[in-house]
Image: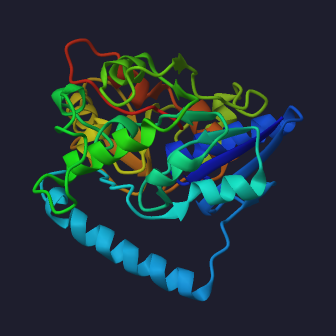
């Protein structure tokens, strides 16, 4: 069997890392896996970036500028990613050239692939959902369920110059999905599975709960003292580890984490906050060490083993708190 993957990224974000893990896991099991990545960074085997001519690159740059301009107004009231899916690389053309038995989609938004090109894919499709974008309009994370459970616009199709760009995109998605004969959705969490089933666009499709994979030959318990020494961390500190692509994004629950940790200041001896990612955060009264962006998996393993508490897991299980969205891919 030949599997052809499509992803904007093969690292850098949780969704990109998860896609790379699935691809390399299939290769390790002898499956013919090919990985089409628009913005590669990991140098994985059996990957490729769609070829593009000089004029194709110019055209793509122009479409990207138009896409950015269209999203400028919606982004004013939103603090996460928005995508139209209207522009990008033609998925069907690559499928025809590669001739796979199965297509697996990962995170394909952000002006990477043109969603409507899926309508011409004739082989079965498995789509691993990292967020809510496949069944919403522009939104990748949407707290108001009515945005994706309400009926589609009358006649399904709205004009591009409609005052509601998100509803236009949702209607375009509906038209594309209606032409897909074999589509199975894989989700990494029970929450995302339930929201997918409630949605108008994908609620009638098969949905499977498939937790995010992990290389258990690498992510194994290590000696905590040795990991702390290697990382330059205090051997006797009560270390709380937390990280995200952006701690400043409300959707990740960073504000709740910092609020909760602030209440512990002065109550736990030698408490230390260790963070990783783009953003540097501070909690008054608590010592903080920032490790920067972590791309090396061995360094990530050492960090996990050095910690006494993983802040994200602790936060996600607090009763009565805001639902922390996301697939926790990394």
Which residue is drawn at the image coordinates 58% and 21% (left, top)?
210
Which is more toward the observer, 189 or 234?
A: 189
Q: Position of residue 70 (x, y in %)?
A: 23, 66
Indicate left or right for 278 with 260 as reference.
right
Query: In this rendering, does residue 15 appear at all?
Result: yes
Q: Quadrant of residue 51?
A: bottom right
Q: Position of residue 290 (x, y in %)?
A: 43, 52
- Residue at the outermost top position: 319
Indicate left or right for 194 with 189 as reference.
left
Which is more toward the observer, 122 or 86?
A: 122
Q: How many marks?
A: 0
Indicate left or right for 7 with 101 as reference.
left
Q: Position of residue 231 (x, y in %)?
A: 60, 47
Which is more toward the observer, 330 or 55?
A: 55
Q: Position of residue 90 (x, y in %)?
A: 55, 61
Which residue is drawn at the image coordinates 74% and 27% (left, top)?
216
Which residue is drawn at the image coordinates 21% and 24% (left, top)?
322
Query: In this rendering, does residue 79 appear at all?
Result: no
Relative to 320, does residue 33 appear above or below in the rendering? below
Q: Quadrant of residue 241?
A: top left
- Residue at the outermost front position: 155
Relative to 69, does residue 134 appear above or below in the rendering? above
Which is more toward the observer, 193 or 239?
A: 193
Which part of the image, by quadrant, shows the N terminus?
A: top right
Which residue is drawn at the image coordinates 24% and 36% (left, top)?
142
Which part of the image, by quadrant, shows the C terminus?
A: top right
């Amino acid at each position: 069997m030949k599997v052809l993957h499509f992803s904007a990224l093969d690292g850098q974000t949780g969704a990109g890392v998860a896609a790379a893990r699935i691809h390399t896991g299939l290769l390790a099991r002898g499956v013919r896996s090919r990985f089409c990545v628009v913005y590669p960074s990991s140098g994985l085997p059996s990957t490729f970036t769609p070829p593009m001519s000089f004029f194709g690159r110019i055209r793509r740059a122009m479409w990207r500028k138009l896409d950015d301009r269209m999203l400028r107004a919606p982004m004013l009231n939103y603090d996460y990613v928005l995508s139209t899916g209207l522009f990008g690389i033609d998925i069907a053309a690559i499928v025809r050239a590669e001739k796979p038995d199965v297509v697996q989609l990962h995170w394909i938004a952000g002006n990477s692939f043109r969603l409507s090109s899926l309508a011409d894919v004739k082989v079965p499709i498995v789509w691993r959902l990292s967020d809510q974008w496949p069944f919403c309009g522009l939104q990748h994370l949407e707290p108001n369920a009515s945005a994706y459970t309400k009926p589609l616009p009358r006649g399904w199709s709205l004009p591009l110059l409609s005052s509601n760009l998100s509803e236009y995109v949702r209607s375009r998605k509906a038209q594309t999905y209606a032409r897909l004969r074999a589509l199975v959705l894989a989700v990494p969490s029970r929450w995302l599975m339930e929201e997918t089933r409630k949605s108008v666009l994908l609620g009638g499709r098969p949905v499977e709960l498939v937790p995010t994979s992990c290389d258990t030959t690498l992510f194994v318990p290590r000696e905590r003292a040795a990991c702390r020494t290697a990382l330059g961390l205090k051997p006797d500190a009560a270390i709380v580890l937390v990280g995200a692509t952006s701690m400043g994004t409300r959707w990740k629950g960073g504000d709740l984490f910092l609020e909760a940790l602030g209440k512990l200041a002065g109550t736990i001896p030698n408490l230390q906050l260790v963070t990783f990612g783009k953003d540097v955060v501070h909690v008054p009264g608590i010592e903080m060490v920032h490790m920067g962006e972590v791309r090396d998996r061995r360094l990530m393993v050492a960090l996990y083993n050095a910690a006494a508490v993983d802040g994200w897991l602790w936060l996600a299980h607090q009763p009565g708190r805001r639902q922390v969205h996301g697939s926790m891919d990394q």
